[in-house]
Image: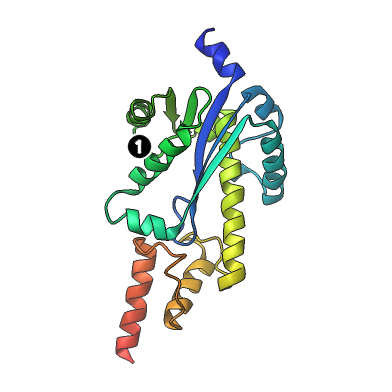
Amino acid sequence: MNDYSFVKVCQCGIDEAGRGPVIGPMVMAMICGSPEMLGNAGVRDSKELSPDRRELLFDRISDLATRRSFVVISPVEINSMMERITLNDIEQHFALKLLEDAECDVYVDSFDVKPERLSRSLSEKSGKRVFCAHRADSIYPSVSAASIVAKVIRDREIKKLSGKYGDMGSGYPSDPRTTRFIRESLENNVDISQIVRTKWKTYQNILSSVKNKTLEL
């Protein structure tokens, strides 16, 4: 069987959701299955889909996938690991865990600026055939499916956190609700250490601003 026909029959994809947010977890997912069936289901880059559409496709992907694996990486884990390694290293660590269950060739939305370097590293360390590319979630149906699964799971986690801590927005630094939530929490001595990424410049800047304001009073 040549490479092309193998890809047509089986394809695994890995993608993440929540790499950049200052609040909440990062979720990495791997989906294996028929790229033709996944493509026919309408999967594409999760950012191009509405929340309702992602939820609908989440269920379809669950039915079509021959394997669905994911890992939720908490802010506490990210904070701890970033004492020693970079965010790219963290993603590679968890990608390798997902790759243990890969059933066929794997395509990854590259989190390294050099996809070839990441392909080589993941292939050598996992013993699997791994191909990384930028915008892979717009090219390979399995990666599109993984992006949807990761995004839905992260959105559900944020919803649970909002139910416990109050409206925190999307968790992204560009979201005014998120930065306001952090500032108000720090000003009111609310413990958000379990849900915020303390290494992020957004958090550090707000923390510094709140401390300076307190000193001026």
Q: Is residue 190 above or below residue 8?
A: below
Residue count near mark 1 (Cα–Cα under 10 Å), binned few <14, some 14–19, many ≥20? few
Is 213 left or right of 135, judged from the image as shown?
left
Q: Position of residue 101 (x, y in %)?
A: 50, 32
Amino acid carrying label 1: it is Val
Q: Is residue 175 left or right of residue 62?
A: left
Name the spot of residue 88 as percent of width and height, x first.
35, 44
The outermost residue toward the left is 84
Quadrant of the rendering where the N terminus is positioned: top right
Name the outermost residue toward the front.
100
Indicate whether 202 appears above or below 212: above
Q: Residue furthest bottom?
A: 217
Comparing 148 with 6, the one in front is 6
Rendered residue at 43%/82% (across/down) = 189
The residue under label 1 is 113
Please tell me whether residue 181 is drawn above or below residue 105 in the rendered image: below
Q: Relative to 67, does residue 71 appear above or below in the rendering? A: below
Indicate left or right for 35 with 199 as reference: right
Q: Please give the name of the residue rendered at 48% of the width and 78% of the height, measured from the top-left corner.
A: 184
